[in-house]
Image (spheres, grey):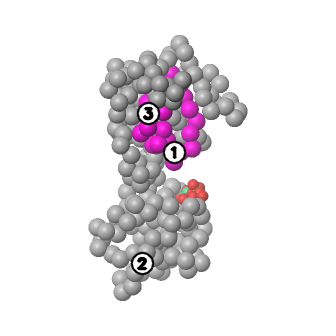
Amino acid sequence: MRSTDKIVRDITGDTINVALPKGRLGEKVYRMFAEAGYPCDGILDDSRKLVFENPEKQIRYFWVKPSDVTIYVERGAADIGVAGKDIILEYRPDVYELLDLKKGKCRMAVAAENGFRDDTSSTLRVATKFPNIARRYYEKESRDIDIINLHGSIELAPVLGLSDVIVDIVETGSTLRENDLYVVDTVVEISARLIANKAAYKFKNDRLSALVEGLRKITEALE
Ligand code: PRP
């Protein structure tokens, strides 16, 4: 079978394919799916298995690297998925955003060393894992910047003088505090979102709408 046959079969079939972000957030979100009526045996067991299916409920889950969920959904390998608003804003995938799941709440922020003030006389060096979000933020501020694209431990950059500021995720704020950094400005509030492949949303609309409604009720109860 060619890979395209498989995608067509899945998009028009009855089984809902869900890309969940591997890790603690994904486990919390899976529990919401289970509560909404779509449980799946063995999915939370400690194993290396990546695909889990409940044929009776016609649902199949994949554990995916969190930053890759949008790719699986945009290309139709998954019908729906759960991705952080940070990833959605950074990559702007061509998908529908269906629901704020109200989990994984944090914010994207500009941070700098305690005492830092931007004097705007020279190009601002910005270290980040989110170059597109950072660029858009500083475009609005009409500020000249030099992006330093890192992949982790972003907080180290201003401490070592590699950058003036960082644009990064702040959840509890402890990483900033423990490295003598402070939040200069909040760029955007972040939380996990339910996203859908556009074709799958059309072909599986009845099934997906029922699932979204179930999840919506659960998120409303969280407020
Ligand atoms: C994220 C983020 C911050 C930290 C914020 O990093 O990039 O470094 O969490 O959390 P806090 O406000 O609760 O301290 P992550 O743990 O994903 O690792 P990374 O440094 O490899 O990006």
Residue appearing at x 34%, y 38% in the figure: 96
Report the quarter where the C terminus lies.
top left
The residue singled out by tag 1 in the image is 68
Q: Would you say the beta carbon of the disc 1 residue lies within 8 angstroms of ligand 1?
A: no
The residues tagged by marks 1 and 3 sit, at their Cα atoms, a distance apart of 13 Å
Residue appearing at x 46%, y 80% in the figure: 116
Q: Which residue lies furthest to the right in this view?
A: 47
The residue singled out by tag 2 in the image is 124
Give the magenta part as a residue range.
Answer: 59-79
Quick one: SS at disc 2? strand
- Indicate the amino acid at tag 2: Leu
Vertical position of residue 82 compared to residue 179: above or below: above
- Indicate the amino acid at tag 1: Asp
Residue 119, how many percent across, how many down? Answer: 37, 84
Residue appearing at x 50%, y 61% in the figure: 129
State which mark lies toward you, 1 or 3.
Answer: 3
| Residue 106 seen anywhere in this rendered image of the structure | yes
Quick one: SS at disc 3? loop
The residues tagged by marks 2 and 1 sit, at their Cα atoms, a distance apart of 30 Å
- Indicate the amino acid at tag 3: Gly
Q: Earlier in the sequence, mark 1 or mark 3?
A: 1
Residue 89, how many percent across, how many down? Answer: 38, 52
CB atoms of marks 2 and 1 within 8 Å: no
Vertical position of residue 55 compared to residue 26: above or below: above
Residue 191, how many percent across, how many down? Answer: 43, 46
Q: Residue furthest top?
A: 56
Q: Which of marks 2 and 3 is nearer the N terminus?
A: 3
The residue singled out by tag 3 in the image is 76
Vertical position of residue 66 compared to residue 183: above or below: above
Instruction: Determine which quarter of the picture holds residue 74.
Output: top left
Vertical position of residue 18 compared to residue 89: above or below: above
